[in-house]
Image (spheres, helix red, strand yellow):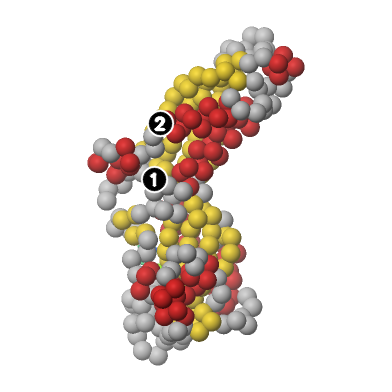
């Protein structure tokens, strides 16, 4: 699919709220103007023309309203942050390819002489629960796995480590160490891929033959609920559901994602290394 980077703007949401540091601002409401920019890949929405491929403006406006009409805040920075956070909570759990939310909150009539308006902007990446498959069958395998989790942005937890027989590729390869890492990543899938490749390069990964031995392989298995299909990236990973060395550790972290039958089958073909300390 073609390169696309787009933004949706929901501008000039006008509401009265009780926010500010001054005593006068704490007792009576004043007008605020809010602009929201959602950035990401709008290719699908551009082609489908369907509301289900984008974020309904109503949701944005409701989130803004909740914060501005809600509990008092001292700072515009805090208001902008709260609004961006609460819009991102919706996006984190959605299939929409929106990767950051920028919110500008403007005090339209600030209680300061000679100042026309004051505003603050906050831009927050949309965090998505992301699963990375790790594999190593060359060199100091556990050191490569350990180094990778130290470098993965937003790392949360690692599955148990498994050992598996290499599939395909040249004969005589060493066994693999495999694991799955759960991370909270707040960028685009392309940025995630670049981070993975940078970490593979740190491990001196050399790309020679297909399925050949590697110091470190990092595959993006799942990226929130997003579906990606470009020349460089396919998410969910296309071979995820047929690879036992991925299914076993993924089932350890997320038993809800792998059927009981599949996880039993997968665990039967790989060995869990209970005593491995990284
Ligand atoms: P392998 O298939 O053995 O993992 P590589 O690690 O060399 O091979 O990856 C080859 C290419 O696969 C990468 O350059 C990347 O662009 C592409 N790719 C497609 N989808 C994914 C994904 N979900 N995770 C990681 N790489 C992917
Ligand atoms: Mg790979």
Q: Residue furthest bottom?
A: 172
Which residue of the protein is positioned furthest toward the right in this rendering?
Answer: 23
Is 52 placed left or right of 62 in the picture? left
Residue at 26% x, 37% y: name it. Answer: 49
The x, y position of residue 69, in whole percent, is 58, 25
N-terminal of the pair, mark 1 or mark 2, is 2
Choose top left, top right, bottom left or bottom right for residue 72.
top right
> Residue 6 occupies which quadrant of the picture?
top left
**Whole-percent x, y for residue 204 in the image:** 49, 71
Between 217 and 239, the one lying in front of the other is 239
Q: Residue at x 42, y 28 (%)?
A: 10
**Relative vertical location of residue 233 with respect to residue 14 in this rendering, above or below:** below
Give the label on residue 28, or none: none
Q: Name the residue: 30% across, 55% down.
A: 230
Image disc number at residue 57: 2
198 vs 212: above or below: above
Question: Image quadrant of ligand 1?
Answer: bottom left
Q: Is residue 138 visible?
A: no
* Residue at position x 55%, y 30% in the image: 66
| Residue 6 left/right relative to 83 | left
Residue 102 percent coordinates (x, y)? 50, 34
Q: Are marks 1 and 2 in contact (CB under 8 Å)?
A: no
Indicate whether 243 appears above or below 96: below
Determine which residue is flagged by label 1. 96
Q: Is residue 98 visible?
A: yes
Return the residue nearer the eye: 190 or 202. Answer: 190
Q: Secondary structure at mark 1?
A: loop
> How many residues crowd around disc 1 within 10 Å: few (fewer than 14), some, or many (20 or more)?
many
Kind of element beneath mark 2:
helix
Give whichever of 168, 162 is nearer the camera: 162
Q: Quadrant of the C terminus?
A: bottom right
């Amino acid at each position: 699919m073609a390169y696309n980077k787009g933004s949706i703007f929901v501008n000039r949401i006008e509401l009265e709220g009780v926010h500010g540091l001054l005593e006068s601002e704490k007792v009576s409401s004043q007008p605020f103007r809010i602009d929201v920019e959602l950035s990401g890949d709008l290719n699908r929405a551009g082609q489908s023309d369907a509301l289900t491929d984008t974020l309904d403006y109503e949701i944005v406006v409701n989130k803004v309203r909740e914060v501005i009409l809600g509990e008092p805040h001292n700072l515009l920075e805090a208001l902008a942050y709260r609004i961006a956070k609460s819009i991102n909570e919706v996006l984190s759990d959605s299939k929409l390819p929106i990767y950051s939310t920028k919110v500008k909150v403007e005090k339209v009539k600030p209680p300061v002489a000679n100042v026309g308006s004051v505003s603050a902007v906050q831009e927050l990446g949309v965090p998505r629960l992301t699963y990375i498959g790790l594999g190593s069958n060359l060199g100091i395998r556990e050191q490569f796995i350990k180094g990778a989790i130290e470098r993965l942005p937003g790392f949360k937890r690692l599955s148990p480590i498994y050992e598996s027989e290499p599939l395909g590729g040249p004969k005589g390869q060493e066994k693999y160490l495999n694991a799955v890492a759960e991370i909270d990543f707040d960028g685009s899938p392309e940025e995630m891929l670049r981070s993975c490749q940078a970490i593979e390069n740190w491990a001196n990964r050399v790309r020679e033959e297909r399925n050949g031995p590697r110091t470190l392989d990092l595959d993006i298995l799942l990226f929130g609920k997003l579906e990606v299909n470009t020349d460089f990236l396919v998410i969910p990973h296309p071979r995820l559901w047929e690879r036992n060395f991925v299914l076993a550790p993924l089932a350890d972290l997320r038993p809800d994602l792998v059927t009981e039958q599949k996880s039993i089958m997968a665990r039967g073909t790989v060995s869990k290394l209970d005593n491995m300390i990284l």
